[in-house]
Image (cartoon, grey):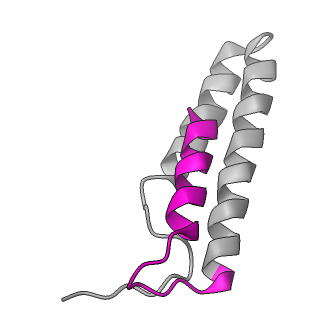
Amino acid sequence: MNATYIGLIWELLDRRSSVKISPKVRRLMRVRSFTTLALFGVAAMIALKYPLVGLGLCICCLLGYLNPEPPMAETRRN
């Protein structure tokens, strides 16, 4: 599921739109996506021996996505 999210982020970041996204924010979004993908992989491995710990790691990763704005992104409200 997270791999498809990475594809979505790439598509959204690479399209030209009226909203200018700084290179720093683009990098942060990509790093966050790959970091959570790696953590999901680690959680899957840990869950084989300790299922509750693996579930806890997955929950921590998902909590990071509760705020859809990337860190340090400027938000404009109309």
Q: Position of residue 63 (x, y in %)?
A: 50, 48
Dominant secondary-structure state across the stretch colored magenta:
helix
Q: What's the residue at 64%, 38% (across, down)?
A: 3
Q: Position of residue 76 (x, y in %)?
A: 32, 88
12 in magenta:
yes
Q: Quadrant of residue 50?
A: top right
Q: Is residue 11 above or below residue 3?
A: below
Q: How many marks?
A: 0
Q: Quadrant of residue 74?
A: bottom left
Check the image and name the residue furthest to the front: 16
Q: Could you tell me which quadrant the N terminus lies in?
A: top right
Q: Is residue 60 above or below residue 40?
A: below
Q: Is residue 48 above or below residue 59?
A: above
Q: What's the residue at 62%, 65% (across, down)?
A: 29
Q: What's the residue at 60%, 33% (across, down)?
A: 58
Camera-nearest residue between 66 and 56: 66
Residues in magenta?
1-24
In the displayed structure image, the side of residue 11 where residue 47 appears, left or right: right
Camera-nearest residue between 67 and 31: 31
Q: Could you tell me which quadrant the C terminus lies in?
A: bottom left
Q: What's the residue at 42%, 53% (across, down)?
A: 66
67 in magenta:
no
